[in-house]
Amino acid sequence: MKFLPKSVFRIILCWMIIFFIQRIIFLLYEIPLYNHAPFGTILLSNIYAIPYDISSACYLTSVPLILLFIGRLVGKPFFIKLTNIYNIVALVIVSILASCDILLFGQWGTRLSYKAIAFLAYPKEVMASLHFGMYIWFILFMVVQIFCGIYLFHKIARINAEEEPRIFQLLVSFIFLGLIIPIGIRGGLQKKPINKGIGYFSEYSVPNFATLNSPWNIIYELFHKVNVKTAYQFFSSGDAWRIRNHIFECNQLPNADSEIIFKTQRPNIVMIMLESWSADAISSAGGEKDVTPFFDTLCNHGIFFDHYYASGFRTEQGLASVISGFPAQPETSILLNFGKFDKLPSIVHQLNSVGYHSASYYGGDLRFANMGAYFKTSGFEKSIGGDNFKDLPKTLWGVYDEYLFDFLDKDLSTMKEPFVSLAMTLTSHEPFDPPHEPAFPGNGLGNKYRSCLHYTDDCLKTFFTRIKNEKWYANTVFILMSDHSHHQPLGRSYDEPARYHAPLLIFGEPIKDELRGMLYKKIVSQTDIPALIAGQTGVSATSFKWSKNPFSPAYPEYAYYSFDGGFGWMTVEGSIRYHRAEDKMDVSNGLNDAVGKKYLELGKSFLQCLMEEYLSF
């Protein structure tokens, strides 16, 4: 009678200890991301993790329960051996998942999600995010977990042949466990199984994420994929669009009402998307000094936007925002969906229609996240990719920035004016591997990140020094902006507004003299770039329904950004963050709850309409 329950509960206990070990490894490795979380809060993650650990342990033990029952029923020791083998195989798989999860959290700031799992279709690029030291950590984490797990299973849960139990006792034990195990898997007897909501017990992201063990989180993501057709339906469609349209009343004004910042209506436009540049590393944006000294010098001669926010946290989200004015989505990414991204509007198409010539420049694989296909459907007449930089030094992501800028310099000189181009840097992408002696010594991610930004900044200096004597330079506006921000160098939480604060600079000879050195202090979204360009060049902006012209007299100050499972809403009064799974709103920057609820309604309406349009494509 005692054999089956005792064996099963010992296996569950082993898994509970293994998950505790994994959580300790996670917390120790992610110390740089704690962002001032109190030690007591960090310890509490172990308490809030218990339901998830029990659920995963019961799930993993359901197979041994069946094997042991069959083995005892038919009297075959083979099934006992098979149970021991299963435990070890499951241990190895769980250890691999947990090790990957721990390492990637340091890069992405979130646990493995459905969106993140979708990027496993690009294994080369995923592996490129890891530096050599991280492979050492991966092996070390694996060894620790597997060694501890094998020891635990051997000492606590190894099943040996024993006296055969009576059939009646075996059946009673199996029925008893058959009721207990499912209750453990669902997390209790409440109406609905546990979800991620109970793990969000504090305002600090690392302790919250630490509550989720890797098997439970991955299984939840795979089997509870958010239904984007219904997940963000907060109001009737008519009410949502009515609230949303009120925000965009400024788009009804003609371009003639826009303040004009250029001396000419048809300047060349060169957009430079700086990989992972965070405002925290830009002195002009109130960040650290001496990381990007040349960029800070340029800010003194252009228009710098010090309250500019990225729409998402991945490059393809930034592309859709800058070229199409289409905001990032929480649960998916439109560039990953053929049949949708080709229906997006494009500022390049609009400029081509009035005589512009266009080209894009990217030093990596254009197949990644369908970027090459998106460039074509967006109207770029020429797309330069990694194949144009063969045999040149590069990171695992693509060619070093100095070679990209060298190619850009030469190629722009061959283009017929007026032209519009987009160049995307790569060196400041993880694993932060600059080609020269790092400006900030040390192996810490923060200094490696700073060194890469400093390197790209030096490449910008060389580039602008070379081109200032080119005949096309005097008629060229440069828009320098981040594709998305980054949690480095200060370890920002994945959902806080500062994680999305990024640099935006408009620089060049065509800018009116009286505006050079201007600090633009209004809140601006990454999705506002198309409407801004349209307002200055006189092309139609009507197709960019999610983009607002910052120089329109009726410009509303807000910025939306999305993260896995929710969105943020930035205003002059403060900000809110909304997490869908917990139906929870957080307010910050002194915003009171009453005003926060007003902005929550705006944000929900915005996101509902955004998802309705996404689904309509």
Image (cartoon, helix red, strand yellow):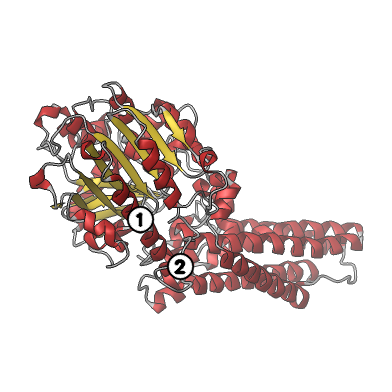
**What's the residue at 71%, 68% (across, down)?**
11
Q: Is residue 62 left or right of residue 355?
A: right
What is the three-letter code of the residue carrying label 2? Answer: Glu
Mark 1: few/some/many CA within 10 Å (<14, 14-19, 20+): many
**What's the residue at 38%, 57% (across, down)?**
486
Q: CA distance from mark 2 to mark 1?
A: 20 Å
- Label 2 or label 1, whichever lies nearer to me, is 2
Q: Nearer the viewer, residue 459 or 127?
A: 459
Asked if residue 190 shows in the view, the reply is: yes
Picture coordinates of residue 375 (x, y %)?
43, 32
What is the three-letter code of the residue carrying label 1? Answer: Trp
Q: Quadrant of the N terminus?
A: bottom right
Asked if residue 19 shows in the view, the reply is: no
Image quadrant assignment for residue 601: top left
Are the residues at dot 2 and dot 1 in contact (C-beta closer than 8 Å)?
no
Q: Quadrant of the C terminus?
A: top left
Q: Nearer the viewer, residue 99 or 325?
A: 325
Q: Which mark is residue 437?
A: 2
Residue that sits furthest to the left in the current view: 514
Image quadrant assignment for residue 509: top left
